[in-house]
Amino acid sequence: MTTIGWLQIAIFFAAVVAVTKPLGVYMFRVFEGAAQPLPRVLGRFERLLYRLSGVDPTREQTWKAYTLALLLFSGVSLLVTYVLLRLQGHLPGNPQHLAGIEPGLAFNTAASFDTNTNWQSYSGESTMSYLSQMAALAWHNFTSAAAGIGVALALARGFTRRPGPDGAKTLGNFHVDLIRGIVYVFLPLSIVFGLVLVWQGAVQTFSPYLDVTTLEGAKQTLAFGPVASQEAIKQLGTNGAGFFNANAAHPFENPTPFSNFLSMFTIFAVSSALTYTYGRMARDQRHGWAIWGAMAALFVVGVVVCYGAEAHGNPAYAHLPVDQSAGNMEGKEARFGVSASALYATATTDASCGAVNAMHDSFTPIGGLVPLANIQLGEVVFGGTGAGLYGMLLYVVLTVFIAGLMVGRTPEYLGKKIEGREMKLAMLYVLIFPILVLGFTAWSAVKPYGVSSLNNAGPHGLMEILYAYTSGAGNNGSAYAGLNANTLWYNVSLGLDMLGGRFLMIVPALAIAGSMIGKKVVPPSSGTFPTNGSTFAVLLVSVVVIVGALTFFPALSLGNILEHYAAISGKVF
């Protein structure tokens, strides 16, 4: 563990803090302001999209209408992507002359990108044409990220709004939130970040692949493509899929240490800023910062543990004459080193991004435990764009309910009472995730078609399966890459895992918003639990950790924890 390593982490954290308020204020104006920014440029584009799609921006929706619009849009998008991938070999924009994608993989990929998971059971440069990368995958990078923000805004409106003068209980308009998220947030930021990546050396071209002769006389094919443009929205939208199989470890995707820093920064930027946007919506900025503080505390603990474990090297080599002064460098890029790799792994799993610049399968048992545990906490440590906020707000409901039980009164949140209906929906939200993860993991661990895809035996093999389904249901997309997931079983089961982890959890979240929007606001009293201080933040962190620990600790004890102690004792599976 070096001074430079700690300095990298400190600079990254400072940059995230610095962007939270200005970007949060900007997004509040975009989604909740009376007038949006740059009306002559972006406003005209927004109005054009409304006309083309037949959307009335003044017409708001109830929670049921909002949910139906989201599900219909996502369902049609999934179907179109599936068809495009199947017909890839007959479509233009295919200089590699790649064939169409087989049904199981096409379903898995369509479900993956539709849910903002971006899990990849394929190698990008040998499977996807340029048209597929842009028209199918990059399209979802924009729309799934904007849809996540829309759900977070709808839930926030349910907590912060009062019924309209006519008694209307509306949460906004899904199509308006979607279009504004793309037009005002993701498109402008992606253009800027994409140009920066090109400046740093990321590839952006439609030229076909190039065959070259190496210095040793061997033949090598250099894969190209419109990489920088997809990398920009991949990071900003916490999508994560790599244009190339090596993902952000590939020099054409992530050329320099500066591009590596910007990649991590953009992963957190929008999700962090949404907490400030929510503070504005709640008319209590301290509450927004309290939620941000809870997220930040979990992030700091995670990165310290991961960096410490990787810097100390592999415990299996502790008693061998192996120089580990540089830490555990297996599976890591030498140009990034241990600290930047540990920071990247922590950030990408805190934020449901899934992009990787090192192979998580090669991390030490405790270092690899951190990315897995981050996802199992519910992807609420900043989380995906929107998904992290609405997930954390559900934990806020649980926290306020527990605090109410402590003082013996009906719990209130932002002046609205939390009652039985909201708690049932919140618990449904919390339970869906482990049911999907542990159910599919147990199934795969006892079936030949599940264990036949493993690259490792023993506890590490179990973690390869557990990580895959955790990543899928958590809509993260990273992996312990030792698992061969490109089989019919894993393509179908992971596809269902991802769809369930996205939409089966969104429905109860929006139902809570619909339930809360119609409630009267009760003035605060001496018995009201304050939600804008350090006590609330500590209790919120405790609830997140306890729920995650109670759910997944038994499985983790059979995996990473057992592997750690086995490595210390010299046991090899």
Image (cartoon, helix red, strand yellow):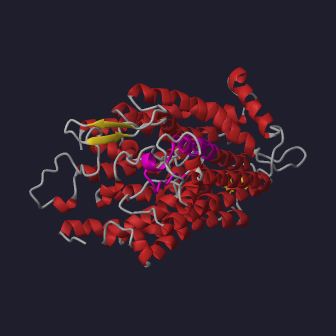
User: Magenta span has 213?
Assistant: no
Q: Is residue 439 left or right of residue 513?
A: left
- In the rendered image, the residue lying farthest to the top is 40
Q: Residue at x 54, y 63 (%)?
A: 104
Q: Nearer the viewer, residue 398 or 386?
A: 386
Q: Nearer the viewer, residue 526 or 573?
A: 573
- In the rendered image, the residue lying farthest to the right is 166
| Vertical order, 344 against 82 (above or below) | above
Q: Residue at x 45, y 51 (%)?
A: 349
In the image, which residues are magenta?
117-146
| Vertical order, 23 against 425 (above or below) | above
Q: Quadrant of the C terminus?
A: bottom left
Q: Quadrant of the N terminus?
A: top left
How many circles with numbers are drawn on the protein?
A: 0
Quarter where residue 317 is shown:
bottom left
Q: Nearer the viewer, residue 234 or 131?
A: 131
Q: Position of residue 225 (x, y in %)?
A: 46, 36
Query: Is the stretch drawn in magenta largely helix, strand or loop?
Result: helix
Q: Nearer the viewer, residue 372 or 144?
A: 144
Asked whether residue 388 appears in the rendered view, the answer is: no
Q: Position of residue 115 (x, y in %)?
A: 59, 53
Asked whether residue 481 appears in the rendered view, the answer is: yes
Quarter where residue 553 is shown:
bottom left
Q: Residue at x 48, y 66 (%)?
A: 490
- In the rendered image, the residue lying farthest to the left is 321
Quarter where residue 49 is shown:
top right
